[in-house]
Image: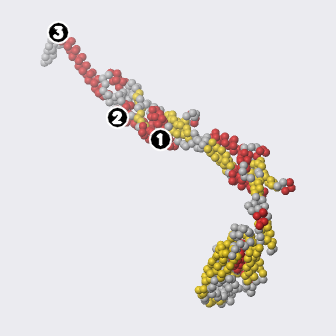
Amino acid sequence: MTDPARPGPGLPEEPPERPGTEWGSVVLRLLAALLVLGGAYTAAALYFQDRQPAGMSVDGIQVGSMTRDQAEEHLQDELADRLVEPVRVSVRVDGSPASDAEQLELVPQESGLSFDLDATLDGATGLSFDPRVLWAHVTGGGRALTLVGAVDEEALGAAVERAAQDYDAEPVEGEVSLTEEGVEVVAAEPGRTLEVRETAAAVGEAWPDRTDVEGSATLEDPLLTQEEVDRFTAEVVEPALAEPVSVTASRGSGDNETSATAEIAPRELVQLLGVEQDGPTLSLTVDDDAVLARIREDLGQLERGPRDVTVALDGDEVEVVPSRSGTALEEEGLVDAVRAALEATGDERTVEAELTEVPPAVPTSVSEGWVFREMATFESQFPTAAGNEARTANLRAGVEHVNGTVVMPGEQFSLARALGDISVDGGYVEAPIIQDGRLIMGVGGGLSQVSTVVFNASWFAGVQLDEHTPHSFHIARYPAGREATIAIPVIDNLWTNDTDNPVVVRSRIDGDRIVMTFLGERQYDVETIDGEWRDRTEGERVEDDSPECVPQNPAEGFTITNVRRLIQGGAEVYRDEFTTTYIPADEIVCTNPAAGR
């Protein structure tokens, strides 16, 4: 048998152990083990230096055992929704209840709000040989990191400013107006202004921990408050319109007394009243002119204007028409009385108006020195042959209209006014008139003869001659240069009574003559100088085959000067001088058998 203590064949023998070498071997083995463990520890520290400890989270998002880059990318993905979920800003003005708060929303990524992931993950990774740190990496420590927000203050302020544009509101002024429909009231509302700086600071301070933030705003009261609107409506407007306001007046006394009442209903008062604002206060206004006009609608029957003394023609005699006083509504204080009645009730809403006497400007006593003697008379013959019936009818109508015309001292006579409406309704008919040097048919034809009579009567009466226009060609029955046509409204015949006595025009048809007399007191003797005809011209013979043709006799053209001298006390005090040029009148021969029909 083999001796185990001995080496086998071919193997060297182990050297015998020396004393003291056994402990050295143990030490070597321990050193080797320590080197192995140290290397493994170092390797573990190096491995975990860029990784989050197991179980670590950020705002509930697990990032354990991830590298920093992995953690940032993961957080960006997980937090992306948070950047589009609005931050709700609850805004209420000072002193208002929370239930009145209005919600504004800010989208973080559009409002300068974001996350600072570098700051959030700072310190969570790095080389560490602390066994506790390594143990946390291995076993998981459940550490939660605080999510750090980032705020771009300029962008946040701009976002809050944009929100303020929708939130802010100007104050609504209260208003009370009176319309045909009645009283209209606009309620007063305060304005509001979002405090941008304070609200932005509150949002920035809360982000990202809180997404429900209290904003701040201020109220701006309107100048005209709802309290004033309510007061004015209840205390002023409603009482004013509660009942009608009556205004009564009477004229005369006893059996001759006449009374009238103007009852102004609330629906009418609305149109007569207004609302005026003076700063923060409202008051009721009254349209004075409109109130007086409304009162006169019913009380105007009691008013009458005064009548100055005048005269009237009774047949051939002039009679004095005495003056008469008038009555007028006393306006002073009347509107104030109506204004006071608006605040009253019952019988106190009735106002007693007064009527005052209005004396005439020219009393009857002025007529004591008036006399009505013949100042001048002028006659003019008119054609009465067949075919002149229409013209004669116009002369009769014109003379009748002018007869009895009274021209008071200082007043101007207008023939156009005296003749009235030159129309068929006014009593006139169609007859030949002159237009562009020829005769044509027109309503009122022949009235130029009335105008010629008026001009000559005023000429010889010595009154002031204001305006007249001669015919374009001479008509044989009129005095050359002393005649006048009329073409309303272009041509009139005007003179002024420049005496201190009324002038009464008396006119009539006597056979085939117009006779016109001015009655009054003349102040001048009149001398007339009719000049010679000069620069004579002849017309032509014209044949007209139109059915509208009006035959016309030829007339010579010429120029003449007429002078009127006004003499007083034997001396000339004034003279009128008129130069008239007449064109020649052609002889018109109508060849159409239908002409003149």
Where residue 519 sits, quadrant-wise, is bottom right
- Between the residue at mark 2 and the residue at mark 1, the CA separation in whole angstroms equals 37 Å
Q: Which residue type carries mark 2? A: Asp
Q: Secondary structure at mark 2?
A: helix
Q: CA distance from mark 3 to mark 2?
A: 60 Å
Q: Which mark identifies residue 111?
A: none
Judging by the rendered image, the residue that carries numbered circle 3 is: 19
Disc 1 crowd rating (10 Å Cα; few below 14, some 14-19, many 20+) is some
Q: Quadrant of residue 528?
A: bottom right
Q: Circle 2 is placed at which residue position?
A: 69
Residue type at tag 1? Glu
C-alpha separation, residue under disc 1 versus residue under disc 3 = 93 Å
Instruction: Give 437 or 469, whichever is nearer the viewer.
Output: 469
Residue 94 location in percent, x, y?
A: 55, 34
Q: Which residue is more in the foreground, 495 or 398?
A: 495
Query: Along the polypeptide, which appears first: circle 1 or circle 3?
Result: 3
Does residue 165 lie above or below 576 as drawn?
above
Q: Position of residue 491 (x, y in %)?
A: 65, 75
Residue at left offset 32%, top offset 22%: 130
Q: Position of residue 300 (x, y in %)?
A: 76, 57
**Nearest to N terminus: mark 3 or mark 2:** 3
Which quadrant of the structure image shows residue 72? top left
Query: Which mark, by number, is residue 161?
Result: 1
Type of amino acid at the residue the image marks with label 3: Pro
- Please report whichever mark, 2 or 1, sits nearer to the chain's N-terminal start: 2
How packed mark 3 is, by other alpha carbons closer than 10 Å (few <14, some 14-19, many 20 or more), is few
What residue lies at 55% left-to-right and 36% top-to-bottom? 93
